[in-house]
Image: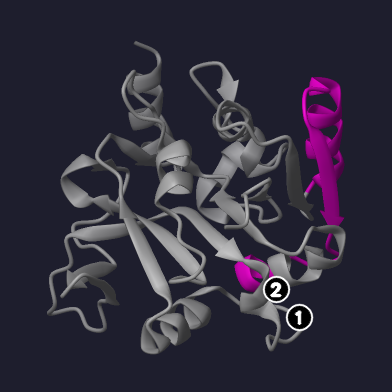
Amino acid sequence: MEQIMQAFILAAGRGKRMLHLTDDKPKPLVEVAGKSLIDYNIDHIKEAGIKDCIVNLCYKGDMIREHLTARGDMNFIFSEEEEALETGGGIKHALPKMRRGPFLVINSDALWADNAEHSLLEDMIKAWDGDKYDMMLMLQPLDKAYGVGSNGDYLVVEGKPVRRRDKETTAPYLYGGVMICHARVFDNEPEGKYWLIDIFDRLQREGRLGYYIHQDKWFHVGDPEATKIAEAYFSK
């Protein structure tokens, strides 16, 4: 089975819902308990034994490049975007800089704490089966998610993830902004600006979408109020 040797951090967006917090810095550099969001992600990636990290850049991207270059503890590969290409287009744009194979993808506003027994990324890597899946989503139980609404994105039906399609349906799991993806997913996808959600739906129809349920606390740092919630937890 192909080894997972790369990680991709989605870091190009401004994060408009963060309001004043992103006026003078990009969202990945917003701090929670004295540490930037992107540093939490990179520390998790390092602990999983991955040394190559691709980061897409757009809004105030030079600040992110400078911050990560100063770390000097990983092989950072930067993918520049003149306008933010969103989640799908951003990955497609960066693929020529990457090895062809499976890789981790992390949203820069996904924040979680591993415990002594479990590392989310290591557990996902162990659960990955590239023969069965083209993507594997981290699903987060709502009762352990903070900074989010009252409904989720996915149900699990007969062992398969099924995306909620209407407001009336109750879904117990959120997509937690962490996944494993194989580069082949994008072979027939266009260049340009688009989101991953349509790819999730296609793979769901094809039976090639896997999932991993995270059992620890997870925080969506998407606006100032959610940032305060995460700050209170990670300051302890």
Given residues 231 and 38, the one toward you in this image is 38
User: For mark 2, what is the residue?
Assistant: 89
The residue sitting at 57% across, 75% down in the picture is 195
User: For mark 1, what is the residue?
Assistant: 192
Secondary structure under the numbered disc 1 in the rendered image: loop
- Which stretch is magenta? 60-89
Task: Tell me if 178 is positioned left or right of 68 in this view.
Answer: left
Q: Quadrant of the C terminus?
A: top left
Q: Quadrant of residue 35?
A: top right
The residue sitting at 45% across, 76% down in the picture is 200
**Which amino acid, mark 1?**
Gly
x, y percent for residue 127? 39, 51
Q: How many numbered markers are drawn? A: 2
Given residues 43 and 26, the one toward you in this image is 43
Tell me whether circle 2 and circle 1 mark residues in contact (CB < 8 Å): yes
x, y percent for residue 217? 28, 34
Q: Is residue 216 above or below residue 200?
A: above
Q: Quadrant of the N terminus?
A: bottom right
Q: Quadrant of residue 210?
A: bottom left
x, y percent for residue 149? 25, 56
The answer to whether one can see residue 138 in this image is: yes
The answer to whether one can see residue 222 in this image is: no
Q: Is residue 235 above or below residue 174?
A: above
**Which amino acid, mark 2?**
Gly
Q: CA distance from mark 2 to mark 1?
A: 5 Å
Secondary structure under the numbered disc 2 in the rendered image: helix
Answer whether residue 73 is magenta in the image: yes
